[in-house]
Every structure is written in structure tokens, then in C-alpha cells.
Image (cartoon, rainbow, N blue to C red):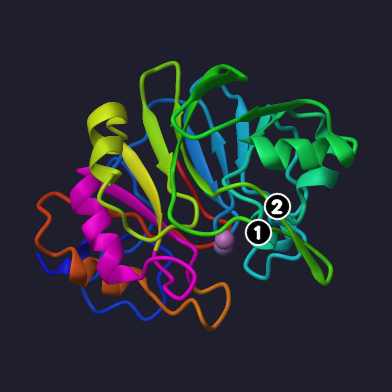
Amino acid sequence: MKAAERCFGGMKGREPGTKIGKPSKEDTVAQLPDGMKITWLGHATFIVQGPDGKRYLIDPFVDSNPACPGDLKDVGKLDAILVTHGHADHIADLVPIAKKTGAPVLCIVEIGAWLAGQGVDNVIAMNKGGSAQIAGITVHMTQAIHSGGINLGDEIIYGGEPSGLVLEFSNGFKLYHAGDTAVFGDMALIAKLLAPDWAMLPIGDFYTMGPRSAAEAIRLLGVKTVIPMHYGTFPVLSGTPEQLADEAADVSGLEIVAIGPGDSIG
Ligand code: NI
Ligand code: MN
């Protein structure tokens, strides 16, 4: 099987013979547990539905997200909002969505302090290495190698360090959202301590790892199912799922689930 044949769905310029379509029971082994669903709003923004139907929004970049389809700009009812770091392309809509939905927000302590000043009080403000319960899941906050300011017009204020998040559901399924990050050797510790089942990894390059580094992240994490993110939103984010498939061609059993913005799995 050629590397590109491990990519599914939503990809432009796919090679002849590439498997097309969203993962289903017929065409792939990559299956979410019953009742779960992942919808990509483009960039690093996802709505994840747990096995009990609860809905979790990760990194609310919606209204001004050029990749987010119009019919998903109203995110609907939410049970929690999870934030990796304070850059505008991850929290641009955090305050209005938190106020509109009333959903609790999980984030690092400095963003939590800033949110209190914005009138958002339903916040779990934690730090890396810790775990917290929110809306029926356990969230583990992990390392990420990146920066973490909050953009306020022309000003940038300190927003704490960037993080990654491992969502642990009641059925035992664990989903790693790496946030914005370079590859780092301690991804092996995330594998050892948390053993995520699936990973959402940035591949766009420039602000985060590109495909070559993301392939090394896959090896360190030991994951076999990967959803690429943080690519294609802007021209500078040039990494592609096809490049990731080529770079990770040595990883046996790997499935790169390259859905398009607005698409869902599960
Ligand atoms: Ni960032
Ligand atoms: Mn970003």
C-alpha cells in the first residue's frame, strides 16, 4: 500500500488510487467508539462529542476562522470549552462563546485569570502535568513547545505557557490534541503515562511542526490514528497530509484521517 492510500477524505489533489471518503466501517479500521463524533471546524478547532452525547469545543476560533464553514459558525449547545493557549487563532471567539453557551472553560491559569477580567467566571484554570474533571471527562494538560501570549489589538499580554490536552472519556478512549507545538522528546512520556488512542497533530509548519517533525511525533507517541490540523488555513501553513503520509511511511498500521473543514468522523 502506498503511503497516500492511508489518507482518507477531504484531501485536494489526491493521487489516483487514494482511498476517498470519510472513514466508515467498510473502508478503514479507524473507528471512534460508539456515540462519539469529531467535527473539524478548520485550523485547530474541533467539536468532540463524547459517548454520552456531551459536546466539547477545543480552541474556539470560529467567526474569523477562514476555514470554518458558515453553517458551523453557530456552535450550538456546548458542555465544555477546552483551550490549549492564548493565541488569537485559538481563542478569538472564546469570550463570546463562553458567555453565550455558559459552558465551563478549561485552560491554563494565566488565561483563566484574564477570563475573570472579561466576565467569564465558570473556569477551570489548571496547569501542565495536572488532570481535571470537566463535564464528564478527565482532561490532562500536557507540555507543548510554543509561545503563549494573548493578542489584544496592538498589544500582547502574557497568557501563560502553551499546552496540549488529553481528553479521557468515560469509555476509556483518550484523544490527544497537541495544541501548537514543535516536536519534543517528552512526547514519549505522554505515550507512557497517558497512552492516547488518537492524536490531533499540527502539520502546517512555520508556527508549529511540519510533516517531518509530526512524523517523529507519531513515532514518539505510538499512535496509529492521526488527524492532521493547523495546516492550509493560511498560505504560510504549507504542510500537507500527503507529506505527512510520506514522512511517516515507515509506521506500520498508521492511518492519517485527513478530513476537510466542516467534516465529521463517527
Ligand atoms: Ni499558537
Ligand atoms: Mn496557532
Looking at the rendered structure, the kind of residue marked 1 is: His
Q: In the picture, residue 172 is in which quadrant? A: top left
Whether residues under marks 2 and 1 lie with C-beta atoms below 8 angstroms apart, the answer is yes
> Magenta span has 94?
no
What residue sits 36% from the left and 26% below the top?
173
Secondary structure state at the residue bearing disc 2: helix
Looking at the rendered structure, the kind of residue marked 2 is: Ile
Asked if one can make out residue 24 in the rendered structure from this viewpoint, the answer is yes
Decide if residue 95 is on the left or right side of residue 207.
right
The percent coordinates of residue 200 (x first, y second) are 41, 50
Q: Which residue is mark 1?
A: 87
**In the image, the residue with mark 1 has its CB under 8 Å from the nearest atom of ligand 1:** yes
Q: Which residue is mark 2?
A: 91
The percent coordinates of residue 60 (x first, y second) are 68, 49
Quarter of the picture holding the C terminus: top left
The percent coordinates of residue 90 (x first, y second) are 64, 55
**Magenta stretch?**
203-231
The percent coordinates of residue 122 (x first, y second) are 78, 25
Q: In the picture, residue 197 is in which quadrant? A: top left
